Image (cartoon, rainbow, N blue to C red):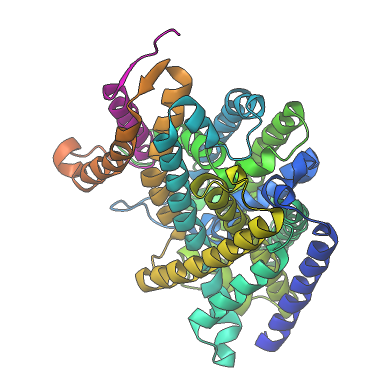
Amino acid sequence: MSPIVLFSFVLVYFLILLVVAKITGKNSTNDSFFIGNKNSNWMLVAFGMVGTSLSGVTFVSVPGQVGTLVGGTNYVNAFSYLQITLGYVIGYLTIAYVLLPLYYKLNLTSIYNYLSTRLGVASYKTGASFFILSRTLGATARLYLVVRILQDAILQSFHVPFWATTLIILLMILLYTYEGGVKTIVWTDTLQTSCMLLGLVICVFYILNQLHLGFFDSLTAMADKGYTKVFFTEPSSKLFFVKQILAGAFVTITMTGMDQEMMQKNISVKTLKDSQKNVITLGITMLVVISLFLFLGGLLYLFANTNGLPFTGDKLFPSIALGHMPPAMSIIFIIALISALFPSADGAITALTSTFCIDIIGMQRRSDWDEAKKKKIRQRIHIGFAFVFLLFVMVYKWIDNPSMIGVILKVAAYTYGPLLGLFTFGIVLKRNVIDKWVPLVCILSPLLCLLIDTNQKALFGSFEIGLELLIINGLITFIGLLFISKKETAI
């Protein structure tokens, strides 16, 4: 497929996004940037959040890991990711009926304001800082994978260096989020999620047709290769279903319910009831969509085996779509891929801008700043985070891990654990902490987890810790907070 043709379609797609941003960003204010004036339609938010939750990493890595071997074993990951997705549903129910009522009751713009009210200013700043770290590392990992594919497929033929490709993508994102923020993203995410899911469905039908298989025949062929196994029952394995379901639940609670990017869209909805419908709908939709991604992964491996193609992991889908499918399918893949990229990157930069403005520099509390000055500062911070993203993408290029979804979940286990401990402590216990010691507890907890993770064999023998490291991290933080707390005194 000609890189010029692919690039032309990318430009047309981006121009459509700019038109949507122009329409939705009219008369935008700081409130519309941060929370969409609390006037977003819950159905649009729910549908758009599918794209934000999945990202380009899901689009490439989830299908790619179906046929890859589990480290140190002779069996494949198969459909094991569905175990985590079942945990997601539990997590979304917890968010809907535990966290959202709390956020709406307090009428929050930033969810980390809860930590200030409940635990103290240092706890509040610590929570916001860990979100900034978590979202920066996770979003740039997602961005890196898609930029790498676009670089190989399109811009490399124009002799554009990797850093310039990243910069071009970030400038595109800045152009359509600069004014409208959340108000714009709710609409652009809806468009992009539609394109991503349409591309996914078309790819599934195309490969089924190429393999001359029906739905049930393809499942039988996948089962013969061991690709359809969902539940793993060996307790010592990282893929043990109890570990995976629990990890999936806590990943969702932290990476959605305690994440400003995801929650600023939820709390932009008019009412609590609508916001709860949004989250539950998202959970059910995610289960269906990820099942479809796994099914696509099985088909891609069958296609690769049939045609003698050596591709595996993150290279599987891009290599087949761009090198072994007709031009029309290559265009569909690229559009679907960037549709998966933009919702995760644009929302992340916007949420990081919101958190830094509201939680770190306290913009809403600055009565000496007028709206014009606040907007100017907010826009500068927005540009600043785009530059930070550029730097971190270059770091990931230097690391170049073969499976970015594993990297993202591992990063989440270290950086979201303190947030899990902070929110759980505040909600479950009626105790006051010594606020000034909270940052130390939240820093020590991931460091202890790092020691545990790197010394697993010495500590546990054949028993493997996987994504449940997030739960351990949260528990260590919780215990640390318990040590520096005392019972609330009646006033």
Q: Is residue 134 above or below residue 333?
A: above
Residue 202 appears in the figure: yes
Quarter holding the N terminus is bottom right
Residue at the spot x=36%, y=73% of the render?
398
Q: Please tell me whether residue 488 belongs to the stretch shown in magenta.
A: yes
Residue 216 showing in the rendered view: no
Q: Nearer the viewer, residue 5 or 80?
A: 5
Magenta segment, which residues? 465-491
Which percent across, then down, holds residue 169? 61, 73
Q: Is residue 175 left or right of residue 84?
A: right
Q: Nearer the viewer, residue 442 or 207?
A: 442
Residue 95: image quadrant is top right
Side (left or right) of 482 relative to 113: left
Say whether residue 87 is magenta: no
Tell which of 463 and 37 is nearer to you.
37
Query: From the image, which quarter does the C terminus lie in?
Result: top left
Q: What is the x, y in percent for residue 159?
A: 54, 92
In the picture provided, is 87 more to the left or to the right than 422? right
Farthest residue in the front direction?
368
Question: What percent of the width, then of the height, locates residue 415?
Answer: 39, 46
Total tally of numbered discs in the picture: 0
In the rendered view, does 430 fall on the left or right side of 345? left
Q: Nearer the viewer, residue 354 or 76?
A: 354
Name the residue at 72% across, 49% down.
Answer: 48
Q: Relative to 388, say whether 235 is above or below.
A: above
